[in-house]
Image: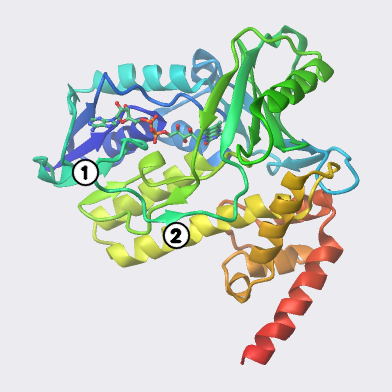
Amino acid sequence: MSKIAVIGSGTAGCFASLRSLRLTNSEIDWYYDSKIPTAPVGEGTTMTPLDALRKLDDWTWREVEEIGGTCKQGISKKNWGKSGKRFLHSFPAGGVGMHFDAGRFQNFMFDRLSKDKRVVTIDANLKNPEELDADYIIDCSGNHWRDNEPDVKVTDIPVNRALVVQCDPSTFRESYTMSDAMPYGWCFVIPLRERIAVGYVHSKDFGDIEERKVELEDYIRELNLHPISETRTIDFDNYYRTKNFGRVSYLGNSSAFLEPLEATATTTLMNGLQSQRHVMSGNYIEEFANVSYVKEIENVISMICLHYLSGSVYDTPFWKHAQYLALKRYSSIDFLKSECYPLIQSALYGDLHNTDIAGTWSTYSYMQNIEGLGLKQRLQEIFQTSGIMASFGD
Ligand SMILES: Cc1cc2nc3c(=O)[nH]c(=O)nc-3n(C[C@H](O)[C@H](O)[C@H](O)COP(=O)(O)OP(=O)(O)OC[C@H]3O[C@@H](n4cnc5c(N)ncnc54)[C@H](O)[C@@H]3O)c2cc1C
């Protein structure tokens, strides 16, 4: 019988073990290092992960409740663009995602999957996964690099730190994640069953952390929420790896990390796991899987930057910088060749017949965001100018 080794028991390792168990007949050696804790942040999804849990593990709302989760219908956004109006980026009717307690999800999946006789769990610190006795290895070891750091540092995204605090859920009921622009970034509100996770994603390169803490406190007060935990500070880099697939495949944070606007990490993970399976079964050559994955990551970066392009109701040095980076991306000739450009064009001109997907988004998703962010005219002007530049280039 063939063998798959999964490294890591975080969210990525749990999904990798689940898919490997349900979609192959292989034995699974599941490694983790109990001295290296998982990163139990990342508590909003698109529709894809919940759909996978339903299909692969018979999930109902009971399981979602058991991990402290709630139904997510989309994202509600405010203070982006100049109007400051709240707007929705909703999932299509009939489709839902979830908000989930990442720590509880990991414990739940670890308990559940480790009971299967094809799964062996091993607490060990691995130095070189290549040497493992396994046919395929899925490295979900997070950002604990050995000598194999990802090769691309993403410079278009202007944020690199989050302040996260948990609040009492009794005064707040919502089925949307909230993502509201703030003077130096944006805040998320994720309504879970037993707590509300609130985070201020911002740049540590502008101003003082104490000022950000005060802005976060004011925001929490305006929502009539009450903190029940200390505020945690999480520094992060935005990066990705261009070679992810082979006998050893990298997924989760060991492959890529992008700031959490639009909550795409678990979706990128699911799509990556699908590519890994295609590579394993010989349907995809490694190069095709690598190129497709990088295109997906670039689509996510573009969707994130679309928000920064719109600016916000705040006129601060952060927003000037963020808008400058986004404008540079959107006016480049490379952007005109990117996978999401035709969908954005369809969204701009109301053509819902374009049924392609870029990243995880349909034309309708782009339409909701472009209209809500107030970017229709601005994007038309930008593309007109870059189109003229491109024709000079030819
Ligand atoms: C502020 C913030 C908000 C976020 N919000 C969202 C969101 O809303 N939605 C979303 O999808 N994502 C979100 N994310 C992203 C989310 O954090 C990641 O998707 C998730 O944490 C993936 O982690 P992981 O499983 O790759 O790695 P980790 O959780 O870091 O797990 C690593 C595992 O590898 C093991 N390990 C490490 N090194 C070794 C070794 N040498 N040998 C053996 N085992 C080893 C560890 O023991 C551990 O089990 C957010 C991130 C941040 C910072």
For the residue carrying disc 1, how many other residues have a C-alpha within 10 Å: few (<14), some (14-19), or many (20+)? many
| Residue under the point 78% across and 53% down | 310
To which residue does mark 2 refer? 294
Residue at 22% x, 29% y is: 30
Where does the image place residue 255, in percent across and percent down from the top left?
Answer: 38, 47
The extreme front residue here reads: 208
Q: Is residue 127 left or right of residue 38?
A: left
The percent position of residue 373, horizontal first and vertical second, equals 81, 50
Where does the image place residue 207, in percent across and percent down from the top left? Answer: 69, 35
According to the picture, the residue beneath numbered tag 1 turns out to be 137
Q: CA distance from mark 2 to mark 1?
A: 20 Å
Residue type highlighted by circle 2: Val
Q: Is residue 139 above or below residue 175?
A: below
On residue 328, which mark appears?
none
Local secondary structure at mark 1: strand
* Quarter location, residue 220: top right
Q: Would residue 71 be visible to someone looking at this image?
A: yes
